[in-house]
Image (tube, helix red, strand yellow):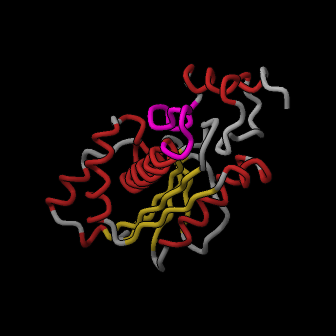
Amino acid sequence: MRFVAGADEAGRGCLAGPLVAAAVLFDLDALGVADVRALSALNDSKQHDPEAREELYPIVMRTALKVAVVSRCVRGIDSRGLHKTNLAALHDALARVARPGCVCLSDGFPVAALGHDQRAIIDGDATSAAIAAASIIAKVSRDRFMHRADGLHPGWEFRSHVGYSTPEHRDAIPRLGVSPLLRMSFQSTAYQQLAL
């Protein structure tokens, strides 16, 4: 096997912000010893701190044959549902990098057929370099978006929690109301104090 594509997403469990899926295609024959050594630090993005993810991001971009990032907005998540949105985003990201003869790997969830060998791997971001690379790209891309959103939506502290359900984020909801980045389809206790 020469070509391996991996896909993963970031932001599935967030109260606010987009869901971001990424796919990475590696040409295993083109990777040199230095590339393999640099990629050996890959793991599930949640296992790395933000600084380590930022260091891995350009390594993945340099060593990958192709990279695709797909973002799904809050209103789309609310109207279509999170799971459907997630599967479609993973599929679309893989479709953008897949090539004849490749195997397409997704983290945990099987995606719709792409016309290539496909496998869903439980905890794939901890066992597949291609999925782990996609995990890094998705997480860094999403975090950068949320950091920019912090300046556009003062008081929400998106830079610190990037949309996840932290105590600070939940406390801001009754104080500030509904941010345009909040996913209102989530059944969260954080929304119980709002008069919706």
Q: How many marks?
A: 0
Query: Where does residue 194 sit, x and y in percent of width and height?
Result: 79, 25
Query: Where does residue 40 sit, x and y in percent of width and height?
Result: 24, 48
Query: Where does residue 139 sit, x and y in percent of width and height?
Result: 45, 47
Give 76 or 125, whichever is nearer the viewer. Answer: 76
| Residue 161 covered by magenta stretch | yes
Query: Who's the residue at 60% across and 37% down the image?
Result: 14
Residue 173 falls left or right of residue 104: right
Q: Is residue 178 above or below residue 98?
A: above
Query: Who's the residue at 26% across and 57% down the image?
Result: 59
Farthest residue in the left direction?
34
Residue 161 falls left or right of residue 110: left
Query: Who's the residue at 63% across and 54% down the image?
Result: 110
Query: Where does residue 118 sit, x and y in percent of width and height?
Result: 56, 63
Part of the protein shown in magenta: 151-164
Give 58 or 112, whichever is nearer the viewer. Answer: 58
